[in-house]
Image (cartoon, coloured by chain):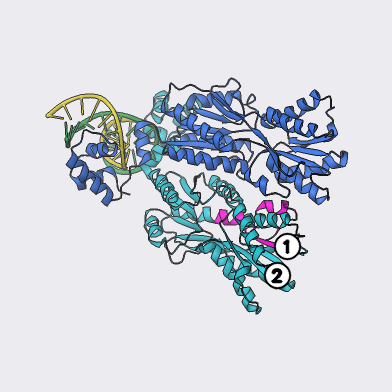
Chain colours: A cyan, B blue, C yellow, D green
DNA sequence: ATGAAAGCGCTAACAA
DNA sequence: TTGTTAGCGCTTTCAT
């Protein structure tokens, strides 16, 4: 790889002049500039961002940590983050923790050591329990937290309201006459999942429907996990509708119901959350609460870059609307 | 972020000594080492890989370019690449070109400017047509080409034999008595897709079955594309089995057949390629040619890192075996 | 309008 | 066993 010195030598100018040309300074004579540009082209030279970063403390690179590459919600998210980053000539380094906390911290360490300018954190873990970790991190560089509000932490946050989303979906089922509505929620204390679950509880309560333990299944965030959870749930009860707190899990629910020979939506209806593109390609296609994934990604990226480039930009919570999309898995 | 100088000052030694401690040199007194380690811990200092790279020309970072984040084959591939990279304390920067050539070159440029040590290229584009581009690239850094042989290019390659895979699948259908076997292949001249298609052609020929245009559908590599292609195909003919050259596309085929009310596999059987984890979660579960995705990822990463760390390691083609997995989409 | 020199954080060659 | 010095590729004073 040619360096700025190579260019300088060939163009018979100083490194400074080359640097000026690169940065479009107007303190350089037209002819000189042309000559330098020619040499740059000839050597197909591009400045090393690493070296630039070394000097200027900025690498035009930010990190993205996600829990799981195989969750299509993140696939679509990443696709849009990448696109948004490109527009600003930034590049994203993506790390997946595969749902392992230690691995996640490790990944973040590795990213920090590579002088990233900022970080987008996709987490379904408990923000509060990780408060001090996040606070320490936020002191080092701008952070955007995805899919949940910032809860007073010194970070920006971008999300849609999972509580409202699942509540709307549940209300829809209730309006359609369903009374025995099952739900496949997430294990443990993952606020992203819990908040959605709370929406379900609230909708039932408001309609005077009792929340019963045997209509509630617990699963990790995978298709297979939801499949198993649904199996268990069906041994305890016979709902007329099942909600999954993510589309990926809804696919597992669907598989289980299909295997057992239930007619969908006639015998059991299904609703999901996210609106990943695959939902429309299931049989039957899945009713879901659509998150504006592209907009979420774009807002997150834009907000992060704004904070990186201007230290006076303040953190903020950006809430976007989700909306119910009715498909064939409900009547 | 604290620097090596901060540590040196606080520990009252030189930067060199700190550096020695960091790199486990044994030329440092035990007590000094303890003191330095203490300070390192106190400041929670980690050396900047950027600065290390600036000096030593290595960043322990490699690039991965893929065509599409939403193809679960790549999701799974990435998951395993990440894991393999971690073992060597490398980190991968992933860029998706979203099937856009210009964007891909752009991404590669951006990666190069960040001093990556090597590059894994997932391509279904024509290697030959891009020969000079790849040759130039390979002169700059070690390259591993995925999913197709190196065709004499100065790169390493890791793949399983798509020709043999689809041929095996096709033969299986033929043995089961199928004669009208449709195929959804990829658009244009994408060798990865074409090679698989050739396996289909060869199997038919060997059994004296004519290859008919109206049993062949063309699609991009998406679920939706395959869905449309299947629709078209069914207007021209009524196969008893349909092969898709990727599982993702098989999902599109399945959706189309389900929509039309065909009983699977009784009226029409389906076969795919890749064995992404979702295949077992479709209804019915999909018969497919399993690529050893994890092993492919691991071999690719290991080979790349070997080449990075020892310039005398030679490029090689690594071919792994795929195998047919029978599930419910075929009898 | 141009260039020389210093310095970003680190390591390696050389000296002590 | 430890430290001094130089330099990786770049930008930014500060001179000229």
Q: Give the residue drawn at x 80%, y 32%.
A: B174
**Chain letter belonging to callout 1:** A
Q: Give the residue drawn at x 87%, y 39%.
A: B236
Q: Give the residue drawn at x 39%, y 47%.
A: A109
Q: Is residue B188 above or below residue B234?
A: above
Residue stretch in magenta:
A270-299
Query: Left or right of B134: which side holds B183?
Result: right
State the residue lying farthest toward the front. Answer: A235
- Which mark, by number, is residue A172? 2
Residue A29 shown in magenta: no
Q: Is residue B181 above or below residue A287?
A: above
Residue A297 shown in magenta: yes
Residue C14 in picture, x, y percent from top left = 20, 24
Contact between labelled residues 1 and 2, with CB atoms less than 8 Å apart: yes
**Chain letter belonging to callout 2:** A
Quarter of the C terminus of chain B within the rendering: top right
First-in-chain label (2 vs 1) = 2
Task: Evaluate whether label 2 is on the same chain as label 1.
Answer: yes
Q: Which quarter of the figure has residue A36?
A: top left
Q: Is residue A304 above or below residue A242?
A: above
Name the secondary structure under disc 2. Answer: helix
Q: Find disc 1 in the rendering and name its residue.
A: A326
Residue B259 in view of the camera: yes
Residue B243 in picture, x, y percent from top left = 75, 37
Q: Which quarter of the figure has residue A58?
A: top left
Q: Give the residue drawn at x 76%, y 62%.
A: A265
């Amino acid at each position: 790889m040619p360096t700025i010195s190579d260019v300088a030598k060939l163009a018979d100018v100083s490194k400074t002049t080359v640097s000026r040309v690169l940065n479009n300074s107007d303190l350089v004579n037209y002819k000189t500039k042309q000559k330098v540009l020619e040499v740059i082209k000839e050597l197909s030279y591009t400045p090393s961002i690493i070296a630039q970063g070394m000097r200027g403390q900025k690498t035009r690179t930010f990190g993205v940590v996600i829990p799981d590459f195989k969750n299509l919600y993140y696939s679509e998210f990443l696709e849009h983050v990448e696109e948004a980053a490109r527009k600003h000539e930034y590049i994203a380094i993506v790390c997946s923790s595969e749902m392992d906390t230690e691995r996640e911290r490790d990944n973040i360490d590795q990213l920090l050591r590579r002088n990233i300018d900022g970080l987008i954190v996709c987490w379904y873990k408990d923000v509060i329990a990780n408060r001090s970790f996040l606070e320490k991190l936020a002191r080092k560089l701008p952070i955007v937290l995805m899919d949940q509000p910032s809860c007073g932490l010194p970070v920006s946050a971008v999300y849609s309201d999972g509580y409202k989303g699942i509540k709307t979906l549940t209300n829809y089922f209730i309006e359609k006459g369903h009374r025995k509505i099952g739900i496949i929620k997430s294990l443990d204390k993952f606020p992203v999942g819990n908040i959605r679950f709370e929406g379900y509880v609230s909708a039932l309560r408001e309609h005077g429907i009792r929340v019963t333990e045997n209509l509630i299944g617990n699963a990790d965030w995978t298709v297979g996990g939801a499949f198993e959870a649904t199996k268990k749930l069906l041994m305890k009860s016979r709902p007329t509708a099942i909600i999954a707190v993510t589309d990926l899990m809804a696919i597992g629910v669907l598989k289980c119901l299909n295997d057992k020979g239930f007619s969908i939506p006639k015998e059991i209806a299904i609703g999901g959350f996210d609106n990943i593109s695959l939902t429309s390609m299931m049989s039957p296609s899945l009713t879901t609460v659509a998150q504006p994934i592209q907009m979420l990604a774009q807002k997150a990226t834009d907000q992060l870059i704004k904070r990186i480039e201007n230290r006076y930009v303040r953190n903020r919570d950006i809430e976007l609307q989700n909306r119910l999309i009715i498909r064939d898995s409900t009547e």
